[in-house]
Each structure stands twice: as C-alpha cells, then as structure tokens.
Amino acid sequence: MIDTVDWRVPALGAVISLHDQLLGWLRDCALPLWDRHGVDRVAGGYFETLAVDGAGGLACAGGVRRGRVVARHVYAFDVGHRIGWESRVSNPVEHGRAYLFAHLYGGDGLFHTAVHADSRLPAAPFSLYEHAFYLFALARLAATAGEGHSIRSTAVRCLDRLRDGWGKVNGGFDEARPPVAPLKSNPHMHLLEAALAWIEVSEGAARHPWVELAGELVSLCMRSFVDARTGAIREYFDHEWRPAEGAAGRILEPGHQFEWAWLLFEWAASGHAKGPSRQATSAAALRLIEVGEGSGVDQVRGVAINEIWDDMTVKDANAKLWPQTERLKAWCARLVNSRGPAETELACRKIEAAGRGLWQYLRVEPAGLWHEVWSAEGSLTPGPSKASSFYHVVCAIDVLRRTVARVGMPLAAARP
C-alpha cells in the first residue's frame, strides 16, 4: 500500500482536476436535480427515470418502486450529506428510510423486491440481488440514523434469513426456492459490498457476522468465480459453482472485473484474517484490472464495453454508463496500492482516462442527467436517465474523493 507520494508525478494534477470537476457536478447539479424531480414526495419512494420532455421540462416515470432504487438513493443522498450538500425541500435520506420500512419491509428480516407505487402491494418475487442492496442501505442508515426501526438488528435478522432460506452448503446463496440455474456471481459481489459497509460501521462482536460473510464470499470468489486459466471472473454458474454450460458460462463483463477488483482490494485492506491471504487477494485484484483494461476497454472511444468472451474477444461492444464508474473505482484502488512513482503515474493516468470516459456520459442538458449507453457505432444513445444508475456514479465520485484524502494529496499544491 502507498505510504508516500512523489508529488512531482505529472498525472497527479489531472486527478485533482477530475476530482474537482466530478465533485462539483455531483454537488451543484446532480443532487439538486434528483432531489427536486426524482423523489416522489406524494406517493413515496423514488421515480425510476428522468427525461427531458417535449416542452424542455423534466418527465419522471415509474409505477413500481424497486427496492434497489430506494436502497441506492438512500446511499446516494447520504453521500451528498457527507460532502456538505443539503436538500432545499426535505431530507431525501429520511424519505427513503421511511418508505423502506413502511412499504418494502415484509417483516422478520425479509424485504419485498418491489411494490406497486399506487397500491403498495408486492410486485415481484424474492431477489437476492435486491436484498444485497437493502443490507447495503441499512449499513448507511445505521451510521447516520441511530437505532430507529432497530436497523442493526434488522440487518442481522435479514442475513440470518438469507442463510437459512437460500444459503448453499458449498458457499454462497441460491437465488430462488426451489433452486434454479444459472447462479450468478453478481448478487454475491453486492453482498460483499454490503458486508464491507457493515464492517466499517460496526465494532466488536457486532462485526463478526459481517466478517464471516465477507470472508466466505471472497473465498467463493477466489475458488469458483475466478477462472484459474485467465484470472477473470465469470458471470453464470451451475448449482456446484461450475461455469454454466454453453455460451452463458463464457461471458465476462469488464465492468465486473473492475468492480470485483475494487472490492477485493477493500477486503485486503480491512485487515481481517478470514478467507484467502491479503497477498493472494490483492494479486487477484491486480489481474482483474489487467483483464478489464486490456480486453474490456475500447481504445477508440476510451470506454469500458459491456461484455467479452472468455478468450478475450468482444461479445458486446456497446458501452453502458456503469462500467465506466467501476473502472474509475478500480484504478483508485490501484493508486492506493501503488508502490513507487511508476505505478503511481500509471494509476493516475488511468484514473484520468476512466474519468474522461465517464464525463462523456454526464455531458447532458440539463446538467445532472446522463446518457446510459454509448453504442458500438459511436453514438451516445438518447433516452431517459435511470435512477438506478445514480448509485454507480455517486459511488465512483465518492471513491475518488476518499482516495484523494486517503493518499493525502495536497489539493492546493497539486492543482495545475
């Protein structure tokens, strides 16, 4: 891990400029816009999309309230509060907390995947993915909202219910009862994210279930998700955690290579002994960044694409917004773990490149919206901005912000 930084590294100035640009966009444009137009202060919850209407105003849509959007907005607006932003309407974090417990919590530790906005009746079956984000949001609420609604005990009960109802004897979780295939690595990645969030806000014995969960998931990742031949993480598996048959078992997502790399670096830095060694975990993270950057980034557009095959050839050259955010986070982790000026310079140049790619998606009027897809043909596809994407963008900006603080960059001195 980095101890000192040679401030003469040329690319540091670009990182500082990117930090200022993205943080200003979030604080001054995105948070106010989504607070004013994306929060449904009549029916509750948050709208699914925002788009420019024919008259130049903003149109909001979404008759279903998905748990992931509510949970992700709790996180996004909480980050806003942490950087000094405040709503001019009402607290959107408290709005999300109230809606979550009043309408999405089914009781006894489990949550609804989604509810209808009008009737508030359940709208979808159980989702492991959604529960990962509920646990993630509960960790943020535990750090900011005290013990209202017994947040910590609810999270522990939720984890217990997941283990009892969907836990697998060979590690990880099924996603339905009775079990169905394929199983996916993606929900487990977000469960690891939630476990790390809980480790951060817990102390003493209260940390134990989350350390156990994180260690189990990292072990499963290293044992089954990571392909021994390429070092890449696959997406789809059978019930024994073998790659799914046919084309599905060969799919790799560059965005997830970056996202897993960031999480593995975070776990290695946490200092807990559960699971693989810090050295092995960090080495796996480095390889994932190599896979994502080497085969998953279109050098012409400068952006991470959607999918590649396990032979590192392109499967889907379209480029969604969210992989750009994960690329930025991964290289921030690489900077924190740099050793020497050459690695620092490389990480800073890649952070700047990832941020430049991300910024292309954010250049939308009104400021605070974004494009969702950059087509393989080279055009940024017009259309509504998805509320679910806000979490990805906010997380990337927050990771960049914390990275700048973590390595002790002297902001005023480093600015060009």
Image (cartoon, grey):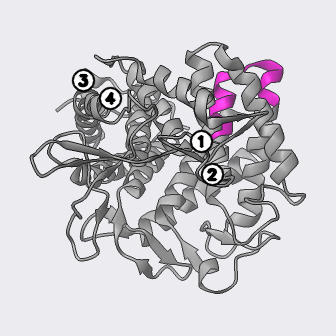
Label 3 residue SS: helix
Q: Looking at the image, which residue is at 69% across and 65% down?
A: 225
Label 4 residue SS: helix
Q: Amino acid at mark 4?
A: Asp
Q: Which residue is mark 1?
A: 133
Q: Residues within 10 Å of mark 1 (few under 14, many from 20)?
A: many
Magenta range is 194-208
Q: Looking at the image, which residue is at 28% across and 16% down?
A: 88
Along the viewing direction, whichever of 356 and 41 lies nearer the viewer = 41
Q: Amino acid at mark 3?
A: Ala
Report the number of discs. Answer: 4
Residue 374: give x, y in percent of width and height. 27, 65
Q: Which residue is mark 4?
A: 35
Q: Any mark on residue 413, and which?
A: 3
Question: How far is the residue under mark 4 from the one under mark 3?
Answer: 34 Å
Q: Looking at the image, which residue is at 67% across and 66% down?
A: 226
Left or right: residue 185 versus residue 76 is right
Label 2 residue SS: helix
Label located before the other in sequence (4 or 3): 4
> Would you place residue 171 above or below residue 98 in this image?
below
Label located before the other in sequence (3 or 2): 2
Label 1 residue SS: helix
Q: Which residue is mark 2?
A: 129
Label located before the other in sequence (1 or 4): 4
> Is residue 53 in view?
yes
